[in-house]
Amino acid sequence: MLTDLTLSQAQDQLRSGAITSVELTQAYLDRIQAVDPQVRAYLTVTAEQALDMAAQADRRRQDGDNSPLLGIPLAIKDVLTTEGVPTTCGSRILEGFIPPYTGTAVQQLFDAGAVMLGKTNLDEFAMGSSTENSGYFTTRNPWDLDRVPGGSSGGSAAAVAARMAAGALGTDTGGSVRQPAALCGVSALKPSYGRVSRYGLIAFASSLDQIGVFGRSVSDLAVLMQTIAGHDPRDSTSMDYPVPDYTAALTGDVTGLRVGVPKEYFTEGIQPEVERAVRAAIQQFADLGADICEIGLPHTEYSLPVYYLIAPAEASANLARFDGVRYGPRHSQGAMWPTYKTTRGQGFGPEVKRRIMLGTYALSAGYYDAYYLKAQKVRTLIRQDFDQAFENVDVILAPTAPTTAFHIGEKTDDPLQMYLSDVFTLSASLAGIPGAVVPCGFDDNHLPVGLQIIGPAFGEATVLRAADAYQHVTDWHTRQPAL
Ligand code: GLN
């Protein structure tokens, strides 16, 4: 099946003329029609537009264009603005909202000739770890339809896992690219803060949000990253650093690579099969000639409380703009205040309301120093843990999530349990450093496990090199769910 090809394999076939982008895109649309009624990865499928984009890509190819993404069908998380296409953030408060512009990263993919298949489901405003907080429906894990795909970018991860897209964009604030990648058995990368423009990413927590990529192999991630990385004058937090050649960085060689294994990431609460798979992956790196050593990241235990102060605080400010005046549906009550109240009361779901309340409290006069400022100070300590570690190691290997995919409904009544599924991803977000995920095995229920590879700020090339080298000697990433 055409949809079984990785991005790079599909590109080879497109280049050789064996297939056209219209054929490839139609194959994906057929696959979506066949499988998505069960998985429910997409909020919107833009079939007509996709075929138009594909036809345009085929014309560009006839004119001699050979760009690596030309004609490749991708899925876009519905928190990234797309001109003329509904963008809901998984929230009822943006139901029917059609943005007047396309954000930078998505536009860069379009300029490179990629085809958008549609917009994927997520936890409302990217707040969650299971897509169960979506205001529309829950996406299902392609490996077991009774389980969650992870979140918040669960739709993007499930779409790639179920062969409903060749690759996808997601966003990661505290783990939303990495955790669903692990739970769905796909490869992914959350880049450093500032590596990819956030222009057109509807903000959740501005000091943490970052766009990331999903694919079926690390070499596919390298191609996607190459297109979206770099400085953007429209995002003052995007850094003007040179973008390395990520594909050229994939040498397959990790001899002498210094690998740190943080003891704080192998604590109680981790599912034994997850630990076993991750430790086996670490052994594989040793077999490949990497130097493994144990390291300490002593402030890891504070990541969760720190994140759940900073992220809600920033969210409470960012979400103030959704009041029914400028965006989305308005529940008019005549006067202004009751209109705000009803619009926000009906438009936001319970988790978003919880975060707004937590964040508003943490920022309120008299509490700011005790909560927000204190959290920022501890955040610095967490970052310094990594700075120190990276004086002695090149990458850090760790689990991505403490468990494999959990059952739908299992954690919805207990927000703290839900928050705990991000314990291993929050630190890298707080430190602003890159983290990749590669499939590294299965548990006894045949659910995928993901290895996390963390690097220093702007060390994406090294992270990808390590991740790719692992995929040279393993085939976990080639397994696919039976659907
Ligand atoms: N699951 C975490 C949260 O609920 C992280 C979400 C994210 O990275 N967007 O906030």
Image (cartoon, rainbow, N blue to C red):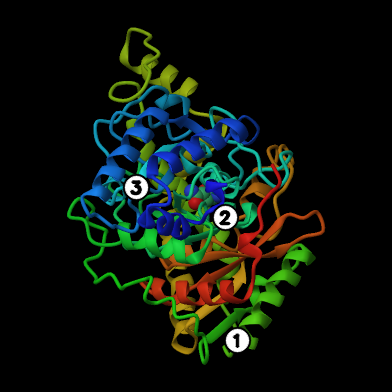
| SS under mark 2 | helix
Q: Residue at x 39, y 47 (%)?
A: 314
Side of 67 relative to 418 (left or right): left
Label 2 CB-ligand 1 distance < 8 A: no
Q: Nearer the viewer, residue 76 or 335?
A: 76
Q: Separation of disc 2 and disc 1 at Cα?
A: 24 Å
Q: Residues within 10 Å of mark 3 (few under 14, many from 20)?
A: many
Residue holding disc 3: 114
Residue position for label 1: 288
Q: Which residue is mark 2?
A: 181
Q: Image quadrant of residue 78? A: top left
Whichever of callouts 2 and 1 sits on the residue coming sooner in the sequence is: 2
Left or right of 303, for residue 449: right
Secondary structure under the numbered disc 1 in the rendered image = loop
Label 3 sits on a secondary structure element that is loop
**CB of residue at label 1: within 8 Å of ligand 1?**
no
Provide residue 426's location: percent of width, then percent of height.
53, 60
User: Eyeballing the image, is 15 above or below 291?
Assistant: above
Residue type (three-letter) at the residue carrying disc 3: Ala
* Residue 76 appears in the figure: no
Residue 82 position in % (x across, y down): 32, 36
From this view, report whether residue 475 is shown above or below residue 283: above
Residue 191 relative to residue 265: left or right: left
Of the two numbered discs 2 and 3 on the same chain, state the one appearing first in sequence: 3
**Mark 3 CB lies closer than 8 A to ligand 1:** no
Residue type marked 1: Leu
Q: Residue 146: percent from the left, percent from the top?
A: 74, 39
In the picture, measured across the screen, residue 7 lies left or right of residue 137, that is left
- What's under tag 2, amino acid-wise? Ala
Q: Residues within 10 Å of mark 2 (few under 14, many from 20)?
A: many
**In this rendering, the label closer to the viewer, 1 or 3:** 3
